[in-house]
Image: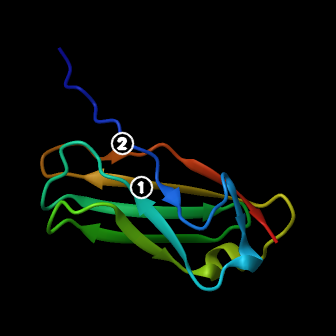
């Protein structure tokens, strides 16, 4: 019998409208929101990642000191803005590492970047 794999919920980009982010309308940085996930524990290492189709990458790490959700990561506007072209996209996701367990990956949210 195999251990049940944790299913992580999707991350959300707070400023996105549906699956679209209007980069020129950002007043500052964007906010990636990680919703509560099952069996969150103090010591979990959460890594949030953004990769754009234009070659920009960003990531940040947070170690849970309390299981308080949602977690909010500040994503610099420049990640989306630099080299922005029509039909550009960004992939948003996160992973969770727990002591003695394999790393778990969230589903990837595909965001269409608009001027």
Residue shown at 62% from the left, 76% from the top: 79
Residue at position x 87%, y 63% in the image: 86
Check contact, mark 1 vs mark 2: CB within 8 A.
yes
Residue that protrudes farthest toward the top in the picture: 1
Give the total of numbered labels. Answer: 2
Which one is nearer the viewer's eye here, 19 or 47? 19
Q: Quadrant of residue 57?
A: bottom right
- Badge 2 crowding class, 10 Å Cα cut-off, few under 14, some 14 to 19, many 20 or more, is some
**Dot 1 lies on which element?**
strand
| Left or right of residue 4, residue 15 in this image | right
Q: Which residue in the rendered view is the most extreme toward the front?
A: 17
Q: Position of residue 25 (x, y in %)?
A: 73, 78
Q: In the orientation shown, which residue stands out farthest toward the right?
A: 86
In this picture, residue 4 sits left or right of residue 92: left
Read off the residue under disc 1.
94
Residue 5: x and y, percent? Answer: 28, 31
Query: Which residue is at 28% across, 36% downward?
Result: 6
Name the spot of residue 103 as percent of width and height, x first: 29, 47
Q: Assign a secondary structure to mark 2.
A: loop
Residue at numbered disc 2: 8
Q: Quadrant of the N terminus?
A: top left
Quadrant for the C terminus, please: bottom right
The residue at 62%/80% (across/down) is 77
Q: In the image, is residue 20 above or below residue 4?
A: below
Alpha carbons under labels 1 and 2: distance apart? 9 Å
* Location of residue 30 in the rendering, given as x and y in whole percent from the top left corner: 56, 74
Residue 73 vs 46, above or below: the answer is: below
Q: Earlier in the sequence, mark 1 or mark 2?
A: 2
The answer to which quarter of the image holds residue 34 is: bottom left
């Amino acid at each position: 019998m195999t251990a049940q794999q944790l299913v992580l919920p999707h991350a959300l980009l707070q400023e996105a409208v549906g699956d679209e982010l209007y980069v020129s309308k950002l007043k500052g940085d964007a906010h990636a929101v990680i919703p509560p996930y099952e069996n969150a524990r103090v010591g979990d290492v959460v890594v949030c990642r953004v990769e754009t189709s234009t070659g920009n990458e960003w990531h940040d790490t947070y170690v849970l000191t309390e299981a308080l959700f949602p977690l909010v990561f500040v994503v610099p506007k420049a990640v989306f803005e630099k080299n922005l072209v029509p039909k550009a996209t960004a992939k948003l996701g996160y992973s969770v590492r727990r002591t003695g367990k394999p790393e778990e990956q969230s589903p990837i949210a595909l965001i269409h970047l608009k001027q």
